[in-house]
Image (cartoon, rainbow, N blue to C red):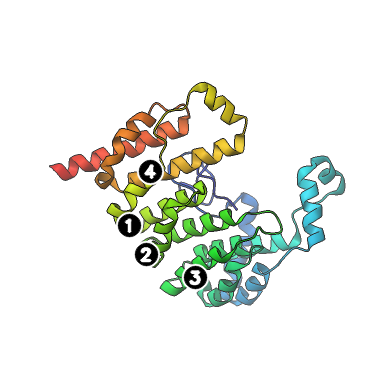
Amino acid sequence: LGTDPLNPDTDGDGMSDGRLEHPPQPRILLGDSNWPALEAAEKVGVKALPLLVRMLKSKESRIGLWFWALAEKWKVAGKLTGLKPSDAYSRRAGALLAFYQLGPRAAPVIPEIIPLLDDPDRALEAMLAMMLIQPESESDILSLTNVLRIQTSSRSGASPSLFHSTAFLALGSFGSKAAGAGPILLANLTSTNGRIQAAAAVALARMGAPAEKVVPLILQNLPKTNPSPTTLLMDLNLRFIARDFTLNVMMNIWALGEYGHRARAALPIFSNLESHTVVNIKDAAKEAAAKILAETNHVSR
């Protein structure tokens, strides 16, 4: 399972391609070893739906989580004990593989998936399942906002902000079909949590929300100055903070690029960011500026 914008799936095969072309999106990353499972899901078809729901509802025991966390922290311990991802995690991942294959044919189980969306220990997989199934009903799509009820971390340590930002990205994947979530997303464009704010910006851009409401708020969240090498080196000592900052800026830039000529006000800021010390931010600004200029020139003809 992944949401890495630095290594996106750009050709739709579920694999990470290592190119920066899209903002992050919750997805399941598939390897060659997964194909037998996909073939089995296709063979059994919708007859497997009751089993798949039970698999998706699987939850780890507390002792199992403790042992797995220990193995992750101490790799030697993991090798010596042969600890592997929990059976519950494997069952949930297997269910997602099957939903990937079945797609809309799995829609009958959506009412059983919705209650999992506000469960910290199952919400991430439930969101992915909804995205893979692609429901048509607006009420089903907007049920993804149930994730916002989560106010505590999962037993594995996933934070509420991770759940909320992932829910916004999931909503954005439905485009204009999720427009009913617009007011919630607009409210979160001023969130003090950078991950949540940037995810809201991406979702609103994908939904085609009104530029006059969205663009000014996104602009407020872009860095106005280029950090000095000394500042950057200090930030890089806090690698996770620096990475999160970079990803959030990139998502905001991408969202503005999607608005084309309606985001012309971003061009002076992009001009400054095109000399940014962080290559990914610099490249994202160049790409978005080119898109805005191209559309502006086309409109003015």
Secondary structure found at label 3: helix
Secondary structure found at label 4: loop
* N-terminal-most mark, 1 or 2: 2
What separation in Å lies between label 4 and label 1 (alpha carbons)? 19 Å
Circle on res. 224: none
Secondary structure found at label 1: loop
> Mark 4 sits on what residue?
220
What separation in Å lies between label 2 and label 4 (alpha carbons)? 23 Å
Q: Is residue 170 above or below residue 113?
A: above
Q: Residue at x 27, y 53 (%)?
A: 212
Q: Residue at x 53, y 63 (%)?
A: 148
Q: Amino acid at mark 4?
A: Gln
* N-terminal-most mark, 3 or 2: 3
Q: Is residue 31 visible?
A: yes
What separation in Å lies between label 3 and label 4 (alpha carbons)? 29 Å
Q: Amino acid at mark 1?
A: Gly
* N-terminal-most mark, 4 or 1: 1
> Mark 3 sits on what residue?
143
> Mark 2 sits on what residue?
179
Q: Amino acid at mark 3?
A: Ser
Q: Is residue 265 left or right of residue 129?
A: left
What separation in Å lies between label 3 and label 2 (alpha carbons)? 13 Å
> Mark 1 sits on what residue?
208
Q: Is residue 185 left or right of residue 120?
A: left
On the image, the x and y values in percent for residue 277 come to 46, 26
On the image, the x and y values in percent for residue 21 come to 43, 42
Query: Pointer 3: residues within 10 angstroms few (<14), some, or many (20+)?
Result: some
Q: Residue at x 79, y 47 (%)?
A: 71
Secondary structure found at label 2: helix
CB-based contact (under 8 Å), mark 4 and mark 1: no
